[in-house]
Every structure is written in structure tokens, then in C-alpha cells.
């Protein structure tokens, strides 16, 4: 028995170091798991990736489409009431459009009927109302662009064949009864030259035409806005800035995607040149398609319909 006990003690003596080693190994693995791998878990946050990899909030959507809106350098005054008085806007027809869209609010009524309106302010909420008011202004205001420009080119068969004319169903009578008929804004030769120069360089992503060829509602509305700003002596550079703000609210997905593209190239929206962004390479339908081929835009809010 004594010999057997001595043998067991010898074996036990050999087993103790093994168990100690096993315990030490387990502790080491635990320590590595707890602290050694923390390099991966605590690695610095990745730097801002490509624009297509980030969400709208990371891109600063508020910079492109401020929630509070954007004030434009254009005093509206009583233009709405004047357009109603000459018939380019039939007030009942105009209001009926919004009866099915939640009603015509106080701001809209003031713009349509009021006489003391200040600077226009565009927001995501009122962008459609401003689009229609400016559409009527561009259509009805007497201007050489409508009388001598591409809209009157014989190859198109008449100015009445376009969406900007045939699609305007909110006039008293026919839209062409008011086409370039009313001297709502009378421009000096210098102001007219500014409008024509800007109109030839400002595009819209629903087509490949500049504002100088206002064949759709957005083009006609932009023409009206340019005429309004020019009539009030707004500098040309400021006109481009305002036009870009307006286009962004009319085509939110487009300009948020353009902002993503610019950031992917190292240019922030705030540092972009409005005149360049409004040009063919960015704001035409073809230019925008090229940009889309290089990014993966976020799913957002739509917009940009060419109807009332």
C-alpha cells in the first residue's frame, strides 16, 4: 500500500504542472480575446467614403435643400394678382388644383391675390406652387425669347405644341391667348441681354434644352424667374445662385445626386460654382445621366414632374 501511495504521488506531481500550463493557456487566450483583439474593435472610425457609400444625412442634405427654405432675390409684390387680372391665371382653376392636394394655404393665397408680397422663399412644401406661378409668368410675360427664340422655330410646328404651352390649362381661355402677350415685366436692353445670356446657360434635368428654349414647365418657370430678377437689378452671379437653389427644390433627387458626385470628386456643394452646375454637363438630362453612371445615388423623394 505504501508503495502504491508513493507511485500515485509521483503521478500527481507530474499532473500538477500540466494542469497549471492548461490553466495558463486558457487565461492567455481569454486575455487576448479581451484585450488583444481590441485593436480591431477600437480602430479609428473610417474616413468619409465615396459619396455613393454614404447616406443623405452624412452628405448634409440640409445644405442642398435647407429645411427652412431659401429666400430668393426676387420681390413678388402683386404679380399674382396682375396675372389673374389679365387671365394668364384663372384663379378658380388654380385653386381647384390644390383643393385635391390638401387645400390652398394662406401663403399661396397671398402670392396669388396679395399686393404686398416681399421676397419669394422656396421650400420643399411650396416649390410646386412657385413652379406654377412662375410658369404662368414666363408664359404670359412679353419677351423676345418667346417671340424670336427656338419656341418659334418652324421645324417644331408652332409654339403651341410644347408641354409649356399646351400643358398650361389654368388660364382663362387658351394658353396661347396669353403667350408672350402681357407686359408684366418690362426689361431694359441690358436686363434683356442678361436674361438671354443666363437662359442659354441654365439647363434642367428633364430634357437637354436650356431655359432659352422653355418647352416644358420648368423651363418656362425658370424664364419667368430670370425675368423677374433681372427686372429688379439682381446681379447675374446672384441670379445663378438663386436658379440653382430653385432647381434643387424642383428636382431634389437630381441635385442631391449631383452633390454626392461633387463630393466624390473632392468638391463640396457650398464650394461648387452655380453657373457650372446649371450648365449642360451637370443639369441637362444627358449630363445627369453621365453623373448617375459614376455614383450610386440614395433613394429619396422624387420630384421633377413636368405637369401642373
Image: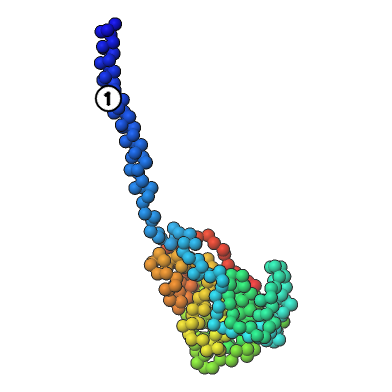
x 54%, y 62%: residue: 300
x 38%, y 59%: residue: 47
x 66%, y 83%: residue: 80
* Residue 128, position as x, y percentages in the image: 62, 72
Please name the colour scheme applied to the rendered image: rainbow
Identity of the residue furthest to the right in this view: 92
Residue 236 showing in the rendered view: yes
Question: Is 132 on the left or on the right of 57, as rendered?
Answer: right
Q: Quadrant of the C terminus?
A: bottom right
- Give the structural element (helix, strand or loop) at label 1: helix
* Residue 265, position as x, y percentages in the image: 38, 66
Could you say which quadrant of the image residue 15 lies in? Answer: top left
Q: Which of 274 and 293 is in front in this view?
A: 274
Could you say which quadrant of the image residue 232 lies in? Answer: bottom right
* Residue 88, position as x, y percentages in the image: 68, 83
Question: Is 215 on the left or on the right of 15, as rendered?
Answer: right
* Residue 126, position as x, y percentages in the image: 62, 73
Residue 140 showing in the rendered view: no
Question: Is 61 on the left or on the right of 217, as rendered?
Answer: left
In the depicted structure, whether residue 101 falls above or below residue 10: below
Identity of the residue furthest to the top in this view: 1
x 25%, y 8%: residue: 3
Identity of the residue furthest to the bottom in this view: 188
Q: Quadrant of the N terminus?
A: top left
Name the residue that disc number 1 marks. 17
In the depicted structure, whether residue 60 falls above or below residue 224: above
Give neighbour class at mark 1: few <14, some 14-19, many 20+ (Cα, 10 Å): few
Q: How many labels does the image show?
A: 1
Amino acid at each position: 500500500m505504501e508503495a502504491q501511495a508513493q507511485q500515485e504521488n509521483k503521478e500527481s506531481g507530474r499532473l500538477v504542472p500540466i494542469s497549471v500550463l492548461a490553466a495558463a493557456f486558457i487565461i492567455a487566450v481569454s486575455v487576448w480575446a479581451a484585450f488583444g483583439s481590441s485593436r480591431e474593435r477600437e480602430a479609428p472610425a473610417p474616413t468619409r467614403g465615396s459619396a455613393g457609400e454614404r447616406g443623405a444625412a452624412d452628405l448634409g442634405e440640409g445644405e442642398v435643400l435647407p429645411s427652412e427654405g431659401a429666400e430668393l432675390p426676387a420681390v413678388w409684390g402683386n404679380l399674382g394678382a396682375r396675372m389673374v387680372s389679365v387671365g394668364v391665371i384663372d384663379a378658380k382653376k388654380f385653386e381647384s388644383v390644390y383643393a385635391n392636394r390638401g387645400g390652398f394655404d394662406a401663403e399661396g393665397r397671398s402670392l396669388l391675390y396679395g399686393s404686398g408680397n416681399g421676397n419669394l422663399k422656396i421650400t420643399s412644401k411650396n416649390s410646386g406652387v412657385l413652379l406654377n406661378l412662375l410658369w404662368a409668368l414666363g408664359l404670359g410675360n412679353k419677351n423676345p425669347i418667346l417671340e424670336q427664340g427656338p419656341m418659334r422655330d418652324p421645324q417644331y410646328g408652332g409654339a403651341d405644341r410644347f408641354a409649356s404651352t399646351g400643358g398650361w390649362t389654368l388660364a382663362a381661355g387658351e394658353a396661347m391667348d396669353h403667350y408672350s402677350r402681357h407686359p408684366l415685366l418690362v426689361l431694359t436692353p441690358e436686363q434683356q441681354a442678361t436674361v438671354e445670356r443666363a437662359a442659354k446657360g441654365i439647363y434642367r434635368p428633364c430634357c437637354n434644352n436650356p431655359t432659352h428654349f422653355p418647352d416644358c414647365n420648368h423651363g418656362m418657370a425658370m424664364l419667368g424667374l430670370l425675368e423677374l430678377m433681372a427686372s429688379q437689378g439682381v446681379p447675374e452671379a446672384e441670379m445663378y445662385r438663386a436658379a440653382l437653389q430653385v432647381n434643387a427644390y424642383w428636382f431634389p433627387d437630381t441635385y442631391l445626386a449631383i452633390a454626392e458626385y461633387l463630393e466624390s470628386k473632392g468638391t463640396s456643394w457650398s464650394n461648387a460654382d452655380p453657373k457650372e452646375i446649371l450648365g449642360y454637363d451637370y443639369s441637362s438630362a444627358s449630363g445627369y445621366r453621365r453623373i448617375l453612371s459614376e455614383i450610386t445615388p440614395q433613394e429619396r423623394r422624387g420630384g421633377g414632374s413636368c405637369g401642373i
